[in-house]
Amino acid sequence: MNRWLARGWPAPHWPSIRGRARTDAGPLLLTAAVIAAVALLAGAAPALLRAAADRAVQDTVSRAGTDSNVLVRANWERDDGPTGGRVRMPNLAEDLDDLRDKATWALGPDLDAALLPPVATVDGPILSISGGSVPRTFQFTYLADDLDGPDVTWTAGSPAGPAVSDQYVENPYDGPPWPVQVGLSEADAAALNLGPGDRIPVRDGRGRDLDVRISGIYRPADSADPAWRLAPALLHPVPGVDGVGTTRFAGLLSRESLPDARLAVDEDQLRRTVHFTPVPAALTWDATAALVSQVVKLKATSGASSERDQALKWESQLDTTLREARARNSAASAQAAVLLAGVLTATVLVLLLAADLLVRRRTPVLGATRQRGAALPDLGAELIIESAVVSLTAAAVGLALARAAAPGVSWAWAVPVVLAGALAGPTLGTLAAARASRDRRQPANPAARRWIRATSQLRRAAVQAAVLLAAVAAFVTLHQRGLLPVAPDGDTGELTGDLILPISALALGALVGALVLLRLLPLGARFVLRGALRSRRPLAVFSAAQAATTAGRALPPLILVTATALASFALILGATVTRGLTDGAWSTVGADARLDVGADATSATPALAERIAAAPGVRQVVVAQVTDSARVFSDSTLFTPRLVIVDAAAFQRLLATTALPDAPALTRLTAPGPTPGDVPALVRSSDGDLRVGTRLQLPRDDAPAISLAAVGTAPSVGGANDVVIVDATALANAGLPAAPNTVWATGPGAAQAMSNTGVTADVVLREDVLRAQRVAPLTTGLLRLAWTAAAVLLALGLLGLALAAAAGAPQRWQTLTRLRTLGLRPRDVRWVAAGELLPPVVVVAVCGPLLGALLARLTLGPLDLRLLTGQAADPAAVLPWWLLGLVSVALLVAAATVVPVESALRRRDRLSEVLRAGE
Amino acid sequence: MSDEPLLRVHGVERRFRTGPTVVHALRGVSFDVAAGAMVALVGRSGSGKTTLLNVIGGLDRPDAGTVHVDGTDVTALDEDGLSRLRREKVSYVFQSFGLIPVLSAAENVAAPLRMARVAPTERERRVALLLELIGLADHAQQRPAELSGGQQQRVAIARALAASPQLLLADEPTGQLDAETGLSVMALLRGIVESEGVTVLVSTHDPVMMALADRVIRIHDGHLDEEAAGQRYAPGPDAG
């Protein structure tokens, strides 16, 4: 020590460092392997999840289709002429170009970079084509992108031209229909059997004939041009878009015929819109916050759509779509962080045990070195150099592999593992060396011995109380605050300080469970020992005594219970998500297939349902009127739930054929209401505002509101949280007949039957929803992480078991050898060893999965798994018993293997060598 | 005491190989010990005392020579035979006590009796007698951690005597004890020899222990250098 004080800094003895490293290469390599493996996982998982988040944003926007477009509308300048007519405005196309440029400039650079170049459209009203056996509709449309519209080849005739050559024309309001020329696609022309020069027999909603003439027939140069998606009827007839059984055709306007189109219809019927379509590939998680902010800002500055001015009116669901994607990503990040925190906790414990094993091997050497006069700082420095080299090298290898697997590797999660690897060994080793130079004798004074024991117990109790308090705080924060960022738009995707506590809740919960078991194990072992002492079998006594002796060791049970519980949790999480996807698909669709009928075709819904019901393989078909954001009042509150008007009995039968929960309360809808005149209703709301017993008013146009009485809790319909269900017959009796717009069907033939209705765009199939959810980037990413985490945790648990057995082996065989000096037979030694090793593992194999199930029950709710599964509510934990059983079996098999292996290894040692080593 | 020696060691050799180096721990050691004698085995550290005790107790096998305990050739016994020998005839006391920490003093003493499947009543009687003998009757229910080092070694001695062995091998039993406690333990061993008639072979550095022995065997580099048979030992140069 004096030399150390004189120098002031440690002077490591390099040959000793090299010698110790060579001697203990095995444990050091094991430590390095653990650090490298976990650094690989901890480094790659966040990067992979980030990549999955980018793909999820892109996937969400792609799936949203045109809903995620950014639209800008603006009214036209009025065209009132000075003589009481309407003036032909030849510069409408230029006005449209100005609008497009103005809107593009307003986007700002971030949003502009995420969107395709704009396409401006001008749409006329939906006109009906007279004649023909089936209802046909027609719309003329003008498309203009940067290159003046998508390229076409005119196969007959010519592009649409102006109706008049004069620059200034005023058409009286009561004048004849103004002629307008349009081009037709080959497919549309063939279907209508018309050609250049023909007049299309169209009529507006008020029954007035329009003069629409075909200037030419075109063929698109590239039918995949995104501009065509805005008006697919310009390429070919589109069935069903204007109602069941209808077919829409479209005529292409030109810059020259656009002014005529305006005069051909009423002043406000020609609408101009600039469409910005997102480029999914250009969207990243990082960019979404700025994009959401910009879209919201644009919508906030938007003029009122009812006002007759030319201000830009912005419309888009892009902000909502991105917000939902961000919420899902945040939830997935938090769920991944919870799993990683569990893996890191188990790894740190395993590294502590590995360090403990290493120090046990080295204690004689370190003690001798210390007794020969080595200073503790020198010894500590030597050990730190060794462990730092091992830990940092291993972490670097792990992170390099992670970088190869996923660019943008995150090193932050690897820090706790590297610190544990670098510090545990030196700390324990220095303490062991310090103990070697202290008097180890047991004090003769009983009070001194009690004091030593009490101090040790107090120290341990303080650590356990600290862990317990941290766990309580973590669980309270988890349940009160949740895991999602407080301000979703401000979420950067990184782990922030306020999330560390709730994310640690699972790991801390597992530690507390392990500590409880740690307290109970010695009690149980002593109880068993008391029973064994009453028996006449010496092996039972010695086994129980050995088990009771080692039951007090903290690290082995801590590791085994923690790793097993966390592995079980990961398995439960994976199973819950997997099952949740199935339930989510049922919840989203409501049946095997759903048909959403357009508002103008509801009269055909019952006939459509009958056709579907008659199809083979269809078990149940139910029609309903489903109205989102319906207005329902209580005494003082406006609610906007999903209103479902359905035949209650049929709906109940339908639910019985699905995996959705039954709703016995539906029978109350056909019973008389609690008050005469009230229509019974089932209600459901996420915030509990819609309660059973509430009286509601359903307003009607030009008639008194209908009173509803909430008589029970409604099932979730289509994943909506706020739902009001009423019986169609009861409501019709009250004066409001239903106009069904939804058809649900179940049965193996339901999907086929729905698809054959000819309105495929509105059919939602459960299998399609489930398939899409299963391959969604975040879902697959989280599931892979859950299964990987479970495997890693199980491996850590088994490694912990092996390390614990190895660390305890010298003492165990020392004791067994002493028992042999008392006359214990060699073949009995294995039974005593098994009696020591197996009982705690059996307890862990039973309690670990149970603890995992308990933790899942306590923590799955705040994890917001429903955001990934698409379920209406947080899913209940699904316990995959056979997988949990495998975890237990793996532990038991490993423990059962340790005993014969250890016996075989120790059998070679002479008793004298074992005893000499123990002296 | 019988004229027939209880322990007969003849030409025992034991070599240890450490890499290319061969260490001769015992080189043709031969001696006899009569029944009921207390023999001190003295020598420097590494002189071969513990090796000799291990060979005698069957914990180690000699490279050459024979060891007879009560007429039984220990070197010819298989593992089961050795176990039976240790259950019935030979017992040990070690420097580090070797008690089972979760068992009380009485239960530790009873361990060999359980192994020998002695009936509970007889076992309890024998344990009470031994605890009385070592002066720890009042500490019967205390665990090793609640006992001092000297008390633990007394319990270890009682355990070694539990199965009424003919030969007690004690390897530096006072090595971890202070002088005063060590003296009381040695006095206990001496008393046991006289009261129980057990033959004790004890390795020690302690001159007081040597003074209590009936005979001292000095071992040096695996040879018996000196044997002071039939007389109490007077401290020599190694006693220090």
Image (spheres, grey):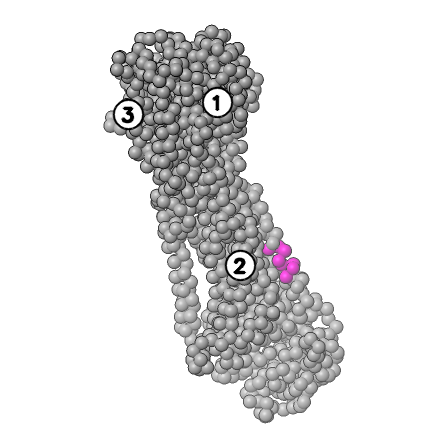
How many other residues sit within 10 Å of disc 3, few (<14), some (14-19) or many (≥20)? some
Q: Position of residue A148 (x, y in %)?
A: 44, 27
The residues bearing labels 1 and 3 have C-alpha atoms spaced at a distance of 30 Å
Q: Which residue is mark 3?
A: A309
Q: Which of labels 2 and 3 is toward the front?
A: 3
Amino acid carrying label 3: it is Asp
Disc number placed over residue A232 in the picture, else none: 1
Q: Are marks 2 and 1 on the same chain?
A: yes
Q: Measure the C-alpha gap from mark 2 to mark 1.
A: 55 Å
Residue in front for this viewpoint, A836 or B104: A836
Relative to A442, residue B215 above or below: below
- Given this view, does label 1 or label 3 mark the residue nearer the observer? 3
Q: Nearer the viewer, residue A524 or A272?
A: A272
What residue is rendered at 42% in x and 44% in y?
Answer: A286
User: The disc numbered 3 marks a residue on which chain?
Assistant: A
x and y, in percent, of residue A314 in the image: 34, 30
- Whichever of callouts 1 and 3 sits on the residue coming sooner in the sequence is 1
Q: Residue at x 57, y 56 (%)?
A: A799
Give yes or no for contact between labels 2 and 1 (Cβ–Cβ under 8 Å): no
Instruction: Using residue A124 as the reference point, say whether residue A894 is left or right of it.
Output: right
Q: Earlier in the sequence, mark 2 or mark 3?
A: 3
**Residue highlighted by disc 2:** A396
Quadrant location of residue A94? top left
Marks 2/3 in contact by CB < 8 Å: the verdict is no
Of the residues shown, which amino acid type is indicated by label 1? Pro
**Residue A775 percent across, percent down from the top left:** 53, 36
Q: Amino acid at mark 2?
A: Ala
Which image quadrant: the C terminus of chain A?
bottom right
Provide the residue span drawn in magenta: A895-902
